[in-house]
Image (tube, rainbow, N blue to C red):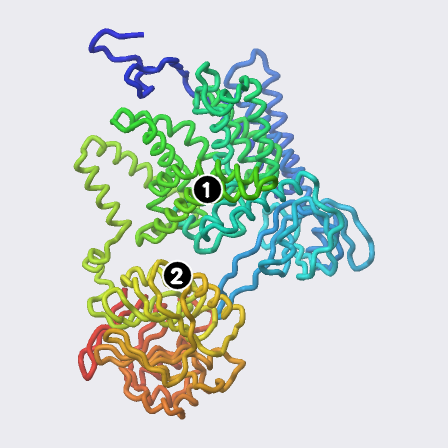
Amino acid sequence: MTGVPGSVRPEVHAASGKRLGASHPRQEGPTDLRLVPPALAAWATAALTLDAPAGWGVGVVAVALGLGVALLWVRPLARPRVAVAAVLLCAAAAAASAGLHGADLRRGPVPELARQYATVTAEVELTSDPRLTRPRVRGNRTTPTAVLINAEVRRVEAGGGAVAVTRTPVLMVVEASGGSPWLRLLPSTRLRVTGARLAPPLTGGDRIAAVLRVRGRAPEVVERASAAQRFAGRLRAGLREATDGLPADARALLPGLVVGDTSRITPELDEAFQETDLTHLLAVSGSNLTIILVLLIGPPGTAQLVERRGLAPRLGLSLRTTALCGGALTLAFVVVCRPDPSVLRAAACGGVVLLALATGRRRPLVPALATAVLLLVLFDPWLARSYGFLLSVLATGALLMLAPRWSAALRRRGLGPRWAEAVAAAGATQVVCAPVVVVLSARVSLVAVPCNLLAEFAVAPATVLGFAALATAPVAMPVAKMLAWCASWPAGWIADIATTGAALPGAGIDWPGSWAGAGLLLLVTVAALLIGRRLWRRPWWCGAGAVLLVLAVVQPPPLVRVISGWPPPGWRLVMCDVGQGDVAVLAAGEGTGVVVDAGPDPELVDHCLRTLGITRIPLVVLTHFHADHVAGLPGVLRGRAVGAIETTGHEEPVEQAEFVWRQAAARGVPVTRAVAGERRRTGELSWRVLWPPPGPAPDPEGPNDASVTLLAEVAGLRFLLLGDLEPPAQRALLRSPEGGLLGGVDVLKVAHHGSAYQDPDLIRRAAPRVALISSGEGNPYGHPAPGTVAALRAQGAAVLRTDEDGALAVVGEGEGGELRVAGD
């Protein structure tokens, strides 16, 4: 079909992006939205009636069913009436399904035993993979890890000896740590647990009827997992073995990309993926399946053509055989990735995309997506309350409805077809999903779109090679290792993108983590799109906006210093604001600082050091091993040249000391022990260790009293950093040979976050001009104590605290010079 010179080509040809137009043009009609209202009605009804009283559920079913039938009964049938009847009937079906599923949680003896906190002997069947909780800092310790497993109680025996047969979903919490045999269990395994305690769920509206707390003894297996689960387990174990020799990030990430196995993902890497909105790559999603199907079938729209591409025509497979192979791949995907609700959701969304690949049409796929939502909600009403389900549907809908329009607009403005597709897909999914993500994270990522764009080019090769390694591992491990090594390059690229993007100072901004905040973000996004659409025709304005956005994300230190005044020029010591914990940085030259303690959170200490421009750390001093002083160590070590770590000789708590050794060993940083009398210097900074003495600390049972105490000097200013010393050790320090050096310090880092336990003689001897207290806002310990603040002020000290003043920077010169403290 050719047009006269100068005429406008038909839209169907112009949209192809090709000079001569489309060889097989397809003219699609308007989007069919008729199934969308019934699907949304079923979704909303299921979400609202899952935990509603039985009477309410029956009432909703009766009213909706009655009205729907009545509307269909009236003749003649009119299209609006049929549409309303369809909505009512789907709502009635969803209410019935939700009522039956909700009743499962209230049926049987388990809920009543949970309300009594009864100790039981139970036989349970596992319904999910075991997963290990991440340690969290509480006070000066980290919470012990536990293994979480979803399961169904099949038989339960309470104290009276009566045995009841039931089928009640519970969450098992097992006191265990990494390497526990509980982590090697497979779904469908039956166990017998004795002496377990039932408890009600912490929050209502969950998929579980009770929490089953199990002591950390070895699991007692009653019946092995099913053959399908054992086969899937062998494949997943083979993939883990094939990735054992890879670099750390690729070893952790590749199983997550392929089958959603996140057992090796470190907290730091997980945080980086959250900051950059790449977490969908760590979960089983429809994109995993789509990549494999594209490899089989070829690009969209070519499945039914004679010149179809992909592996299928090269293998001589007919279209029907190709469809059967696609179905078999989908089934294998579900088996290997476990047939739990998230995988079924992914398979359904992948099936919608498969239909797009086969037909080359997108608009008619909206009814297919609505049908998938309707069937999934009726099959498993708990999906109606799942954020993962909501995000999957929104992302798929954005790819079907928004992305094609945006891609066409970008192509009209000269962007290549592939780049237009990629930019449109990343932008559309981010715009649609961001309001939901902000409810979960209370943060808006400013680097999500570029990070997703850069990662997109590596996802397909990493996934394909990873699945190839998964398939070959049981029969040819050397080949699987080679394939895994090849996959490690794109996987490492994705990990580097996540960590680099998360490390940018302006990678994200805090946002209200509520549905009101989500609505506000949606309004801001719509306004930004409207403004951007108007500015699109003004290249200079677009360029200026892009430059401003880059500056806001990168935040070059010189520019930030000029705008914010932080950090102040010539700072000597900075007390970082890390909540209830300690981090102090002593200036030792341009971009160089000695870090004393690491605080409780890697992200907070990393942010503080980045704002200070610290890239080289000759020494990290960890005063003692309490979690609020060492748990943030990965943030200190991240991307910086660290010479050594120095610690106290009192290695308690043991688990925190081992954590420090593991972190140091992983990065090749030597660990030494601080002893009173030790002197060091780097640049203008010099310091002396005052405590602990070479012998044992006065109270070996108390880590606080073994805190490393430093007397530092820079530019004539003297800083006394006491760690968490308690009064017994403070008095012993005064009596020690080093006690004579304590008089007349300029700045005192008050011991133990300003607690009430301070030795008044030490405060009088030190007589600081400035006292700095590091404590968390609203902490449950009452730090700092009013009496301690009053005692310091009585000695003439200016008292500043991070919970009220934020990060604190000391600026000035010694020997009677001006001393100033600036806050951020």
**Mark 2 neighbour density, 10 Å: few (under 14) some (14–19) many (20 or more):** many
The residue tagged with tag 1: helix, strand or loop? helix
Residue 281 picture location, percent across and down: 46, 42
Q: Quick one: 231 or 345, which is closer to the camera? A: 231
Residue farthest toward the right in the current orientation of the protein: 161
Observer able to see residue 385: yes
Residue 800 picture location, percent across and down: 31, 74
Q: Quick one: 707 or 372, which is closer to the camera? A: 707
Residue ID at (32%, 26%): 417
| Quarter of the image that includes the C terminus | bottom left
**Amino acid under disc 2:** Gly
Question: Which numbered mark, 1 or 2, is in the foreground of this view?
Answer: 1
Q: CA distance from mark 1 to mark 2?
A: 28 Å
Count of marks, rendered view: 2
Residue 597 sits above or below residue 279 on the image = below
Residue 124 picture location, percent across and down: 72, 49
Residue 313 sits above or below residue 181 on the image = above
The residue tagged with tag 2: helix, strand or loop? helix
Observer able to see residue 798: no
Q: Is residue 359 left or right of residue 760?
A: right
Residue 293 picture location, percent across and down: 50, 29
Residue 791 sits above or below residue 129 on the image = below
- The residue under label 2 is 635
**Amino acid under disc 1:** Ala
Q: Quadrant of residue 198?
A: bottom right
Q: Is residue 201 left or right of residue 390?
A: right
Ranked by sequence position, the earlier of labels 1 and 2 is 1
Indicate which disc residue 487 carries.
Answer: 1
